[in-house]
Image: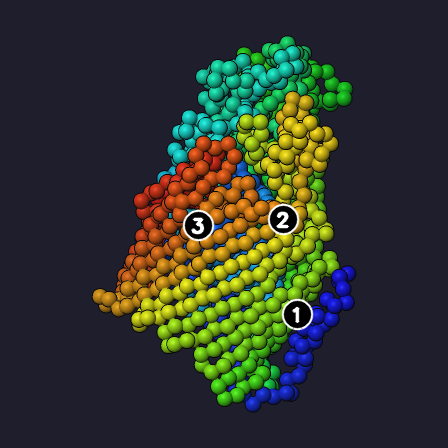
Amino acid sequence: MFDSPRTDRRLALLAGAALCAFAAPAQAQTAPQAAALDEVVVTGSRLSGAHRLAPVEVIDRTDLEAAAVTDPARMLQLFTANSGSEAQVDQLNQPQSSGTAQFNLRNLGLGSTLVLVDGLRWTSSAAVATDGSAYVDINSLVPLIALERVEAFKDGASAVYGSDAVAGVVNFVTRSGVDRPEMRARYGIMDGAEDSLIEAIGGTTVLGGDLTLAGSYAHRSALGSDERDFTQAETYGRAGWTAVTSYGQPGSYFRPSTNGYAPDPDCANPAFTSAFRNSPTDAFCRLDYSDFFDLAPEETRTQLFADWRRPVGSVELRLQAAWSGTETIARQSPSLPILARALTVPANHPDNPFGEAVLFRGRALGAEAGASEAVFNYETWRLSGGVSGQFANGWDWDVSATSSRQHIAYDKPDSIGTALQNALNGLGGAGCNPATGTPGVGPCQWFNPFGSAFLGTGTANSPELIASLTGSTGLRGAATLTTVDLQTDGRAFAWDGGRLDLAFGAQYRRSSLRHDWSDLVNAGDLLTAGYSPDFDGDQEVFAAFAEARLHLGDRIEAQLALREEVYDGGADALSPRVAVRWDATDTLTLRASWGQGFRAPSVFTLSGAQASQPSVFDRGAFVFVNTLTTGDPDLKPEKSEALTLGAIWTPLPGLRLGLDAWRIDYTDLIVKESAQTLIDRAAADDLAGLTGTDAQQRVTRAGNGALTFVDLRFVNASSIETQGLDLSARYDRDLFGGVLSAAATWTYVDKYDIRLTPGAAATSGLGSTNQNTIARSLPQDRGEIALGWSGPTDTVTLLAHYTSGYRNDRSGITDATIDSWTTVDLQYVRAVTPSLDLSVGVVNLGDSDPPLAQFALGYDPVVADPRGRIITVGLTKRF
């Protein structure tokens, strides 16, 4: 199924070179052996030491402890090149990925940063972002205590690692050979919630090898939106951009006799504290739902990790296993709005005050019922093994295999359309047969949608009746990845003043994704979740690569890498990379790199389908609309071209300054069509008197004009051109019997131009929330500053986090300004004894609220942390 004989020949040549290198150890080299087995190969190259050629930002476990990082999502804040991750819970815009977190280097998409663990791939999450992005869930990797360091290679690396490395690579490097057991406990408290983390790591000798074992247990209580004033709609006069909706309970009703809506007669009753009308003439009974969501949900995570390594002569055996289980419980509104179909309250309904059949606009339950809950369960495991050694010619070789899998169980309550309509007709209840029953007689019950049901002036709705009208999304899914990697590398030639190192290898990958929804979702019978089919897809990839590194004296190094990948769907991609480093003086180093990259279509965008309910602006109001986006097996790989120019200057002992200028052109992006754009286009066609246009056929409305469905596609449609600067500085010096250190990283984005379709005019996404584009929130500047002092028994660290102001491009708002935000963290660690450390810290020392953004809950969940001041206490015990 490959697309051409040329593709076969390219892959065969690269694979043949790799096989020849494996099969020909007799061609001995006169140069010394290239590398010992325990040398570290730094992210960005298959050859040790090549990190000198490219920008790699490293955060080690000392940095993580100093920053009081208790979950991987907080780690994202430490990398200024990262922006647009969905690490905070946002049940309004990210309802299917709660409990996960992802890297998003350069804001090029959740799937455009390749995530590795010890240099090997990890399965994509079984959950998919609302825009259809597949990504690696960093919450599911390994316990934090098992991490040695995290390396972020901030340059395109498809030539080295293959698909998904468009924006860069993040490699989680684990600890091994731990000879002293260690336990760590940390407790954090904030206004309205608390969290705790218990971790342990230790090592022993088993079967002649070093075994490292680690485990962690983390629990966080829920922080509700009702705990913060800035999330409350009443704080802003229940403005239209806040968490208010015209789909209320009590609801509103379309009356054919007046050809308009009328509110429930009891809407103004003071018993309904969250119901309101904008004015006495407002036709809608509205709902303030700002009390019913979690800023941080209740979450429990357990993780286990094991690493075993044994040298056998010149060969090393490796085995690694990891398991993670996460349960996230996220609150949501008491019941969801009725979006998928229009429901009729008949004229003979005993509680109908209108004297005619009316259409119901609202939801089954109101604020008085309290919040409902969506439950997410993720179970992730990974097994990997490998063997490495040296040929007689001194070349290293390595064979490794991994298998990883994530299961998801996602249960979200929703009203059942058929059952609710039957109940409005008096044929509700679990014991009622709608085909033979009599309305309101025997087991057949009326559902009363009016305010009178709660007030006691009309028919009451029993808990049993409500239960019979409620179903669940019931998603059960799994994502898997199997890889086999082969590599050999070593010194090919050496001469006076130079040498050439080479690496060759091949890789096989097979990934799959399965989503199995409840029968109600398959039938499209849930009134908010709508229709979504089950699917099961997979993809196989064969790859071969080669890399060369040239040393010219002590001052010049160059890298050339080439990788070919072929997919069972017929697509192929050839990715080159060239990099060079010149130590111009003893204190000044210059470097440059150029490369082409790619990202293959995910299994989901090729064969999946996704229902979602985005917030759109329609006919003067924000509403949630049901959409279904379907995959396309003919999608092309996304392509990129990256250029980086950098300099490192060490003007003084202990002082290191870095500057990297980067540019990335990213084309053929696979995106979900915009529901807002299609709705606007259909409305324009209506005004122009057109009929039967593509947009009109894909936007469905009920008889009363309410939006009920938008038909979307995954398409290769967009491109992004972005460029900017990364700056870094670090200074260390001895002071007062300890070491004073100061460090800073800063990312400045100069350009981020988006073309939504080929040939379209560029739209700048820079300094914008990008609600109307394909990107995510992108402030122009992000900075991290760390100031610390460490002595024999005491360590103090001060961290400052800065995000520049940006604009809100959400439709229908009154103020597009989002101010800059600076928070400061303080951490103190005291070595009570040589084996016991006590830490005390404060995150967000000034208890600064997020800057106001006219989103439903008053802040931008992609950028800001809404939790406020967090006081932490920790103990670390070494045995």
Which mark is nearer the camera, 3 or 2?
A: 2
**Vertical side of 95 occupied by 557: above or below:** below
Label 2: which secondary element? loop
**For residue 818, side relative to residue 381 (left or right):** left
- Pinpoint residue 835: horizontal percent, then vertical percent: 33, 64
User: Considering only vertical position in the picture, is 367 above or below 101?
Assistant: above
- The x and y percentages for residue 453 are 56, 17
Q: Which residue is mark 1?
A: 544
Q: CA distance from mark 1 to mark 2?
A: 35 Å
Label 2 CA crowd tier, 10 Å (few <14, some 14–19, many 20+): few
Going 67% across and 25% down the picture, which residue do you hit?
702
> Looking at the image, which is closer to me, 220 or 615?
615
Q: Where residue 511 appears, x then y in whole percent? A: 66, 57
Give the amino acid at mark 2: Gly
Among all residues in the image, which is located at the extreme top? 355
Q: According to the image, label 2 marks what residue?
A: 759
